[in-house]
Image (cartoon, helix red, strand yellow):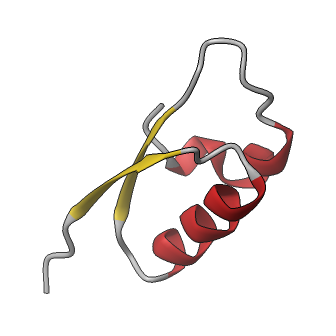
Amino acid sequence: MDYPTILLTGGTGFLGSHLAQKLLQNNYKVIILKRSFSNLKRIEPIVSQLTL
């Protein structure tokens, strides 16, 4: 089954980072739309699996 690509805004925030992790665990491709100055600390463990 091909899973869709998800465009996630706010992916570096508390809720967005948790949602991104769950989507990746369920084999979705996740693209995060973020501000240029956003802190990536919450998504560091999964940043290599994301498209920023």
Nearer to us in this view, 38 or 27:
38
Q: Residue at x 52, y 50 (%)?
A: 49
Q: Residue furthest right?
A: 41
Q: Residue at x 53, y 79 (%)?
A: 25
Q: How many labels does the image show?
A: 0
Which image quarter: residue 2? bottom left
Q: Residue 46's x, y, as percent? A: 66, 53
Which image quarter: residue 37? top right
Q: Is residue 47 toward the left or the right of residue 29 in the image?
A: right
Q: Residue at x 57, y 77 (%)?
A: 22
Q: In this view, does 52 lie above or below 19?
A: above
Nearer to us in this view, 31 or 13:
13
Q: Is residue 9 above or below residue 5?
A: above
Q: Is residue 25 toward the left or the right of residue 45 in the image?
A: left
Q: Which residue is drawn at 59% across and 42% down?
A: 48
Nearer to us in this view, 3 or 15:
15
